[in-house]
Image (cartoon, rainbow, N blue to C red):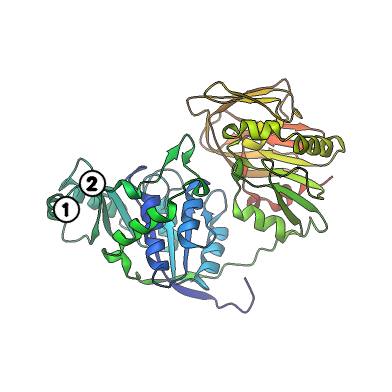
Amino acid sequence: MKSSDPPSRRCPALLISAPGSHHGKTTMTAAIARCHVNQGRKVRVFKIGPDFLDPMILEHASGQPVYQLDLWLASKNECQRLLYEAALDADLILIEGVMGLFDGDPCSADLAEHFSVPIVSVIDATGTAQTLGAMAYGLANFRTSLRFAGVLANNIASSRHEEMIVQGIPPTLRYLGGIARDNKIVLPERHLGLVQAEEVNDLDARLSVAATAIALTELAALPEAIKFIKPDANPVPLLLSGIRIGIARDNAFSFIYPANVDVLKAMGATLVFFSPLTDTGLPDVDSIYLPGGYPELHLLALQNNISMKAALQQHFQQGKPIYAECGGLLYLLESITNKAGEHGTMLGIIAGHAVMQNKLQGLGYQTAPMPSGAIRSHTFHHSHIDTPLKPIAQGNRLYNTSLGENIYQLKKVTASYLHGYFASNPAAAAQLFLN
């Protein structure tokens, strides 16, 4: 953002929401994005909430980086900055909501209201007909301060089914169209959500079918432009000048907020990406960042990459910083056991073992009281760890007073299940990578 940028910028925008999860928000947001990209437009997509997987699909669909918008993790000012900067050069801004429109605190509706973004409600029509109109009417009128662009019916079974749906749409609501039920556009899932975009071999074919369907609806046209206001400048301190940070990035370690990368760069760090799966050694770096991901799906590759394990162990023995989140924490342990009972030997830098569970073990917002300051964070995992290492602190949950995730420290290693959002406290984040 430059001082010469205008005080405000108008850009067409929509927030894609639903009555709840599993109505097809991600698929439809990706389809709308690809439909407009096919028309030669630059589309910037955002995802409300701390999700890592949906943005991968949305980035593939739009061809542009996808950032999280989160009023708690990032603050209103940071969300305002991200939207304003996108509006400077985008032809269309799309925002995918989280869960249902009014679920959570803050919720998708809060963000839509704060930035005056019109809402499209995607509703799965499976098992309903005229009642879909009542659901849409409720969403549109539950909070009258919201701008409601219309309703998109998903998973329509037949032309007759759509006729009944249209019969139930109140005259005060805009019916944007319907998407026929089609397995060719369904996105595959696994235990943490959608399968990573790189692993869906026919993703472009699925997006093409979905975009073709969107092209037959009113969502193929640009919506109205709305005003995005330039926020107050909030420069980050240059605390990492001259520091080289190695960031693990591959199919085992891919859960990293792009805003975290931006913050590290803005503080002066040089970032070098490496793969614990395939690289034979570490790049020349001062510190290591092991983000979350799916190490449990790559046990043998991680176990058998002996040279990489030796390089990371040497980095630790030299007293250099390592910061690890969730899957990165598991990689630091002695072993991981997956749901099938298969076992993989990991780094052994932290004593202990991780075992994947069939049920969710941790979910929600927490503030991480790091030694250098509090960082707003989120947790979402299916594993349990057993370690003799005593935590230095626990995360503070946003919504209740029970103990949050353990935060471990060993020499210059800091590790937790928590995924930190560095923009919430850049100075504290910088200390994780400094000797």
Q: Is residue 91 left or right of residue 146?
A: right
Image coordinates for residue 404, horizontal then vertical, percent: 59, 31
Q: In the rendered structure, find residue 162 and report the number of the disc placed on it.
A: 1
Q: Is residue 374 above or below residue 268?
A: above
Other residues around mark 1 within 10 Å, as few (<14) / some (14–19) / many (≥20): many
Q: In this view, does 102 lie above or below 318?
A: below
Count every numbered label the image shows and give the total.
2
Q: Is residue 341 above or below residue 411?
A: above
Q: Which residue is drawn at the image coordinates 17% and 46% (left, top)?
A: 131
Which of 293 and 124 lies nearest the eye of the viewer? 293
Q: Which amino acid, by three-letter code, is at mark 1? A: Glu
Residue denoted by label 2: 125
Image coordinates for residue 137, horizontal then vertical, percent: 23, 52
Q: Which residue is drawn at the image coordinates 46% and 40% (left, top)?
A: 193
Q: Quadrant of the N terminus?
A: bottom right
Could you tell me how far apart the alpha carbons at marks 1 and 2 are, in whole angstroms? 9 Å
Q: In this view, does 257 lie above or below 358?
A: below
Which of 139 and 359 lies nearest the eye of the viewer? 359
Res 253 quadrant in image: top right
Q: In this view, does 31 lie to the left or right of 280?
A: left
Q: Which residue is drawn at the image coordinates 82% and 39% (left, top)?
A: 315
Q: Is residue 433 visible?
A: no
Res 275 quadrant in image: top right
